[in-house]
């Protein structure tokens, strides 16, 4: 790290000896750290470190806290559908770029997106493409909507403070490196793990898994049952979409809309009115996007099997069939109707990368 700092100032060893009195050296070194540490750490994260991309999945905070100061090819925004649907490490490799950033927040609402796009102008202007992951839930009136939006606003405000405060920037980026270290051992097994789980999950019969989805009672099934019974599209949504698109068009932002797949089991349970409202919203949003990627593009990942065992828990490898997957000790957190496991995410990411390459070719 010291070598990197000295090299930025082109300080030679002989010159360093001249200023090597302890007090003066400490003063110079502290100043250099304060001025250049944020950019050095950012360079380390976004140009050298695969652990960074691995750690973006299943996490709502790391991506947001490391956005400022980076010129990005792709900025990924959206709710938890997005941060579980992507394999960011695979996307980085397929697109041959380290310039990928994220700010994906669990419980994200469209109001959050409007605030984000308007209040992080420097980040948006430094991003070539904005990948916005859609889900119908973002456009509804949820039970805890106000408190979730408040929480998101605070996170976005923290991004702003990171841009203006070097101390906060250093603290957040150092925390990122610590988080990366926690993933090192996992990443070493990345290839072996995905091969193992791809074989296991693909060996399951889709019909058997679908039967289990219908029969289980867990946190996910209960919350979705309650939500679908009461979910209504926000009455303000048409005006909000118009406001959003006006801003996108006025600032010539290259927006790519992505309809993130949910499990077929869940998709089949929306009411005709909910489906109709969502189609109208997507139609209106397309007016300010350079591309819209429909969930039908991601057919391979649109399978109930890829919403099993989201965290790929090892104990599942001892289960050799759908019946044994229906045991009480794993049922409560294993079946998640709207969040992909890593295998589904890899299929999704493969299809997405192919589409993004085509879009880039047209734009160029």
Image: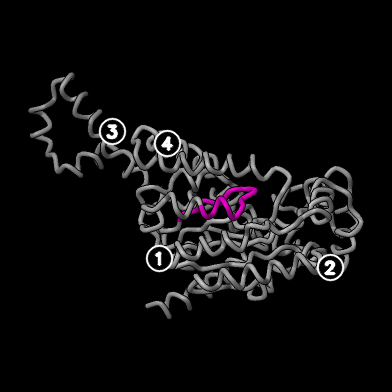
> Which of disc 4 and disc 1 is earlier in sequence?
4
Q: Work out how far the residue at label 3 is from the one at label 2, CA to CA, in angstroms.
A: 56 Å
Q: Position of residue 98 (x, y in %)?
A: 41, 58
> Which of disc 2 and disc 4 is earlier in sequence?
4
1 or 4: mark nearer the eye: 1
The numbered dot on residue 18 is: none
Magenta stretch containing residue 107, yes or no?
Answer: yes
The numbered dot on residue 34 is: 3
Circle 4 sits on which residue?
174
Residue 293 vertical position relative to residue 73 in the rendered view, above or below: below
As rendered, which of 57 and 247 lies closer to the eye?
A: 247
3 or 4: mark nearer the eye: 3
| Residue 193 in sight in this render | no
3 or 2: mark nearer the eye: 3
Residue positioned 84% across, 48% down in the render: 222
| Residue 191 in sight in this render | yes
Q: Work out how far the residue at label 3 is from the one at label 4, CA to CA, in angstroms.
A: 13 Å
1 or 3: mark nearer the eye: 1
In the image, taking residue 258 as reference, residue 363 lies left or right, namely left
Q: Work out how far the residue at label 2 is from the one at label 1, CA to CA, in angstroms.
A: 49 Å
Residue positioned 64% across, 64% down in the render: 260
* Range of magenta residues: 101-114
The numbered dot on residue 205 is: 2
> Which of disc 2 and disc 3 is earlier in sequence?
3
Q: Position of residue 4 (x, y in %)?
A: 25, 42
Quadrant (top left/top right/bottom left/bottom right) for the C terminus: bottom left
> What secondary structure is found at the residue carrying circle 1?
helix
Disc 1 crowd rating (10 Å Cα; few below 14, some 14-19, many 20+) is few
């Amino acid at each position: 790290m010291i070598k990197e700092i000295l090299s930025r100032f082109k300080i030679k060893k002989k010159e360093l000896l001249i200023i090597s009195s302890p007090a003066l050296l400490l003063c110079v070194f502290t100043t250099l750290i304060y001025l250049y540490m944020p950019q050095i750490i950012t360079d380390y994260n976004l140009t050298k470190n695969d652990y960074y991309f691995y750690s973006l999945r299943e996490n709502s905070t790391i991506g947001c806290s490391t956005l400022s100061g980076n010129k990005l090819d792709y900025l990924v925004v959206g709710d938890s559908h997005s941060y579980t649907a992507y394999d960011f490490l695979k996307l980085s490799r397929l697109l041959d770029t380290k310039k990928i950033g994220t700010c994906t927040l669990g419980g994200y609402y469209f109001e959050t997106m409007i605030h984000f796009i308007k209040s992080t102008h420097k980040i948006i202007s430094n991003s070539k493409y904005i990948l916005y992951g859609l889900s119908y839930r973002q456009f509804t009136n949820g039970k805890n909507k106000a408190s979730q939006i408040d929480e998101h606003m605070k996170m976005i405000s923290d991004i702003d403070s990171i841009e203006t405060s070097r101390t906060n920037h250093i603290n957040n980026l150092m925390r990122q490196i610590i988080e990366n270290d926690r993933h090192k051992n996992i990443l070493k097994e990345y290839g072996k793990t995905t091969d193992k789980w791809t074989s296991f999950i693909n060996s399951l019969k889709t019909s058997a898994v679908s039967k289990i989805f219908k029969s289980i009672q867990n946190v996910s099934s209960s919350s979705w049952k309650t939500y679908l019974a009461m979910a209504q599209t926000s009455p303000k949504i048409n005006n909000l979409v118009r406001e959003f698109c006006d801003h996108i068009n006025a600032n010539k932002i290259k927006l790519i809309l992505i309809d993130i797949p949910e499990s077929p089991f869940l998709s089949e349970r929306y009411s005709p009115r909910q489906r109709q409202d969502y189609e109208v919203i997507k139609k209106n949003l397309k007016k300010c996007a350079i591309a819209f990627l429909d969930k039908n593009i991601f057919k391979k990942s649109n399978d109930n099997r890829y919403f099993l065992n989201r965290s790929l828990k090892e104990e599942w490898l001892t289960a050799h069939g759908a019946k044994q997957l229906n045991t009480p000790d794993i049922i409560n957190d294993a079946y998640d109707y709207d969040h992909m496991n890593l295998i589904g995410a890899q299929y999704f990411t493969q299809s997405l990368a192919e589409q993004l390459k085509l879009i880039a070719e047209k734009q160029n």
